[in-house]
Amino acid sequence: MTAERDTGIGRRRFFRALGGVAAVAAAPLTPEALADSESSDDKKKPRYRESEEVKTYYRVNRYPK
């Protein structure tokens, strides 16, 4: 019996490489990169508004006032 060399890429090595590529591709999507796109005025702007839907949610779920 002769020793055959496996010249193809193994399943584990394939998924390891795929994970590495995904990590590099997701790097620009980190919160730090996205936060830099906001101006200082946008950062100070209030974002929470107590609308009628929010008030109904609080009432239905019995949140204290």
Image (cartoon, grey):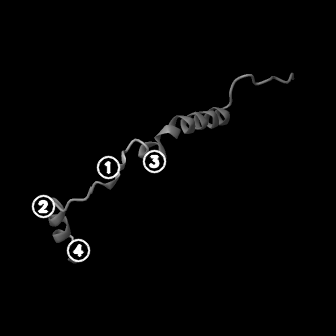
Q: Residue lying at the far bottom in this picture: please name it.
A: 64
The first of marks 2 and 3 along the sequence is 3
Q: Amino acid at mark 4?
A: Tyr
> For the point 25% across and 59% down, which residue is it?
48
Residue underneath mark 3 = 31
> What element does badge 3 sit on?
helix
Q: Position of residue 46 (x, y in %)?
A: 27, 57
Residue underneath mark 4 = 63
Q: Give the spatial CA distance, label 3 vs label 4.
A: 31 Å
**Residue 46 sits above or below residue 38 on the image:** below
> What element does badge 1 sit on?
helix
Q: Give the spatial CA distance, label 2 vs label 3.
A: 30 Å
Q: Give the spatial CA distance, label 1 vs label 4.
A: 32 Å
Of discs 2 and 1, which sits in the foreground? 1
The first of marks 2 and 1 along the sequence is 1
Near mark 3 (Cα within 10 A), the count class, few <14, some 14-19 or many ≥20, is: few
Q: Give the spatial CA distance, label 3 vs label 1.
A: 18 Å
Residue underneath mark 1 = 41
Mark 2 and mark 3 residues within 8 Å of each other at the beta carbon: no
> For the point 70% across and 23% down, which residue is it?
8
Q: Amino acid at mark 1?
A: Asp
Residue underneath mark 2 = 52
The first of marks 3 and 1 along the sequence is 3
**Residue 54 sits above or below residue 1 on the image:** below
Seen from the viewer's position, the closer of residues 52 and 48 is 48
Mark 2 and mark 1 residues within 8 Å of each other at the beta carbon: no
Quadrant, the C terminus: bottom left
> What element does badge 4 sit on?
loop
